[in-house]
Image: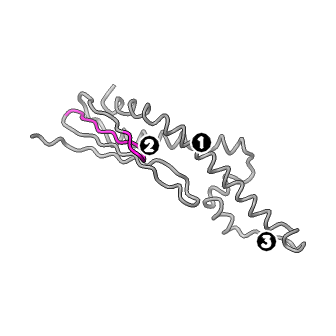
Amino acid sequence: MNAAQKIIAALEVAFASYDAEAVEKDIDWAMGRVAAIKALQDSWSRENNGGKRVQWNYAQLFAVAGGKTWYNVFQGRNGAMIEEFMRKNAAARIERRNASIAKKIGEVEGEVTGEIVYTRDGFDGIYKVGGKAVYINTIRAGGYNIQCAHYRVLVKVRDLIAK
């Protein structure tokens, strides 16, 4: 196991609770968007429109859904299907995040020492690997208005400064 794999393994343990929480928040967000879409469409019903034919305002629907892509995801799916989609989407995001971290760390070789420090909005990892320092900063992003809350991971690999 190289240094990148060791760091990823340590991060997976650290990310486990955050990932589980994020998946549940994603599902709650999606179900909230579906309910908001339904409420908007109900407000446009024939009963509320004097019996006249209802014209959908797709710009409003897309805005409420979080975008055209999310609207298309929610349309024609029941709650269980949306939950399954959100779980698969989160798993793919987690895999991309870990691959991105591994790519930034690269093939740095040497003994891995360091720790993860939990902060108010995520956690930071600082590792020494060979002659390099690997800084991993995790921050909470999004979550305002209709945007999904998610964790943003910033990775920097720097040469250690000899003293």
Residue 46 figure quarter: bottom right
Q: Residue at x 36, y 30 (%)?
A: 5
Residue type beneath disc 1: Glu
Tell me the element at label 1: helix
Q: Quadrant of the N terminus?
A: top left
Q: Is residue 51 left or right of residue 84?
A: right
29 up-or-down from 65: above or below: above
Question: Real-space Cα distance between discs 1 and 3?
Answer: 34 Å
Residue designated by label 1: 24
Q: Amino acid at mark 3?
A: Gln
Q: Which residue has dot 2 on it?
A: 97
Main SS of the magenta part reads strand
Residue stretch rendered in magenta on the structure: 118-130
* Residue 25 on the magenta segment: no
**Is disc 2 placed on a helix, strand or loop?**
helix
Q: Earlier in the sequence, mark 1 or mark 2?
A: 1
Indicate the amino acid at tag 2: Arg
Which residue in the structure is indicated by mark 3?
55
